[in-house]
């Protein structure tokens, strides 16, 4: 089985999620290593569900591949932000 394409998908998804996390949650630049690792762990935990949904949606509607990829990125970013920002701050923004 050739896993090159799924490895590339995972790499691109991870890179896009990290870039988007920094853009949407700039305080990540000043957070502790422990909170940053916790956010990354939350994002990693969300990967199986995000990728499964991405693949299913893309298979059902291939013309929406870019949109389904963006949705998967935002799913991961949401998991990271949930760890980085207190609940009250998330509700205010």
Image (tube, rainbow, N blue to C red):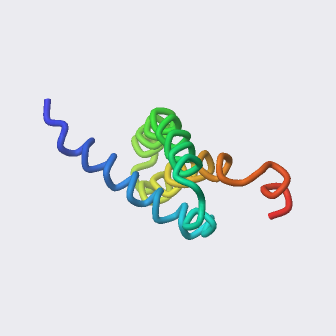
Quadrant hosting residue 30: bottom right
Pick the quarter of the image with the N terminus.
Answer: top left
Residue 36 image offset from top left, x and y in percent: 54, 51
Which quadrant of the figure contains the C terminus? bottom right
Determine whether, in the image, residue 62 is placed left or right of residue 71.
left
Q: Residue at x 59, y 49 (%)?
A: 35
Q: Residue at x 45, y 54 (%)?
A: 69
Q: Position of residue 59 (x, y in %)?
A: 40, 41
> Count the marks: how many?
0
Q: Position of residue 17 (x, y in %)?
A: 47, 56
Q: Nearer the viewer, residue 33 or 1?
A: 33
Residue 39 relative to residue 85: left or right? left
Q: Nearer the viewer, residue 45 or 37?
A: 37
- Give how far across and how far down residue 7 sits, in percent: 25, 43
Residue 14, placed above or below residue 4 = below
Spot the residue most to the top. 1
User: In the rendered image of this protein, does residue 27 appear above or below residue 42?
Assistant: below
Left or right of residue 30: residue 52: left
Residue at horizontal 65 percent and vertical 52 percent from the top? 84
Position of 58 with respect to 21 (left or right) is left
- Residue most toward the left? 1
Residue at 50% over, 40% down:
41
Closer to us: 35 or 68: 35
Closer to the camera, 10 or 42? Answer: 42
């Amino acid at each position: 089985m050739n896993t090159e394409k799924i490895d590339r998908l995972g790499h691109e998804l991870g890179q896009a999620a990290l870039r988007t996390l920094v853009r949407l949650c700039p305080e990540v630049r000043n957070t502790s290593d422990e909170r940053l690792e916790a956010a990354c762990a939350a994002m990693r935990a969300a990967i199986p569900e995000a990728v499964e949904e991405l693949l299913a949606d893309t298979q059902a509607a291939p013309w929406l591949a870019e949109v389904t990829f963006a949705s998967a990125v935002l799913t991961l970013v949401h998991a990271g932000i949930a760890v980085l920002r207190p609940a009250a701050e998330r509700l205010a923004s």
